[in-house]
Image (cartoon, rainbow, N blue to C red):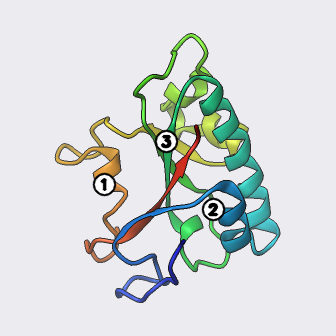
């Protein structure tokens, strides 16, 4: 279950500390609440299908999409590379050029391997749990794909 967002001093409410399991239907029900969010949700579903096809078992969703920001610009995902067959992986998930432009065009979000270095000190999985404005810990959503 995805808990209610809380105020930790950022521009909008975010999920409380923790990793919260949800399926795509639960995420859609909770976060796809307007036309922009529904558009982003379509991209997230399409991306999860492509990652699952390559053998990915777990993705983590972050960004303003899983907050109370009314009109998020995109969503952020880090995906667990364990067991992923690179031959079956859509190579756009490995294309970080031009601010991940190709990822955003195809899936409306940004994607990073969860174990990759995000900032010199944290993996993306760790980095996603830090709220950028306050530096405080916040929550993310985990989707089990298989």
Q: Mark 1 or mark 3, which has the lower sequence index?
A: 3
Image quarter where the N terminus lies is bottom right
Residue occupied by mark 3: 58
Which residue: 69% across, 42% down?
107
Q: Is residue 28 left or right of residue 82?
A: right
Query: Measured along the vertical axis of the image, is residue 37 above or below residue 103?
Result: below
Between the C-alphas of marks 1 and 3, the distance is 17 Å
Spatial distance from mark 2 to mark 3, Cα to Cα?
Answer: 23 Å
Which residue is located at x 63 percent, y 56 percent?
Answer: 23
Depth check: give the residue in front, 75 or 138. Answer: 138
Rendered location of residue 35, percent (x, y): 82, 68
Foreground disc of the pair 1, 2: 1
Q: Nearer the viewer, residue 20 or 6?
A: 20
Pinpoint residue 141: horizontal percent, then vertical percent: 49, 60
Nearest to viewer (mark 1 / mark 3) = 3
Give the CA distance from mark 1 to mark 2.
19 Å
Report which residue position mark 1 lands on: 127
Closest to the observer, 10 or 88: 88
Answer with the quarter of the image where residue 135 lies.
bottom left
Q: Position of residue 73 (x, y in %)?
A: 63, 62
Placement of 132 over or under 74, stated as above or below: below
Q: Is residue 14 left or right of residue 50?
A: left
Q: Which is more N-terminal, label 2 or label 1? A: 2
> In the drawing, does residue 65 fall left or right of residue 59?
right
Furthest residue in direction right, as rendered = 35
Residue bearing the label numbered 2: 73
Residue sitting at x 67%, y 65%: 26
Q: Residues within 10 Å of mark 1 (few under 14, many from 20)?
A: some
Q: Secondary structure at mark 3?
A: strand
The extreme left residue here reads 121
């Amino acid at each position: 279950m995805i808990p209610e967002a809380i105020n930790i001093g950022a521009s909008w409410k975010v999920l409380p500390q923790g990793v919260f399991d949800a399926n795509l239907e639960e995420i859609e029900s909770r976060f796809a609440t307007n036309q922009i969010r529904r558009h982003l949700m379509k991209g997230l579903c399409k991306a999860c299908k492509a990652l699952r096809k390559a053998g990915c078992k777990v993705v983590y969703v972050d960004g303003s999409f899983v907050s109370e920001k009314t009109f998020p610009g995109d969503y952020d995902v880090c995906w667990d590379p364990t067991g992923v067959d690179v031959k079956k992986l859509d190579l756009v998930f490995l294309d970080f050029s031009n601010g991940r432009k190709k990822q955003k065009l195809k899936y409306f979000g940004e994607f990073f391997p969860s174990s990759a270095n995000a900032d010199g000190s944290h993996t993306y999985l760790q980095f996603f749990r830090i709220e950028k404005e306050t530096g405080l810990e916040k929550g993310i959503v985990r989707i089990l794909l298989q």
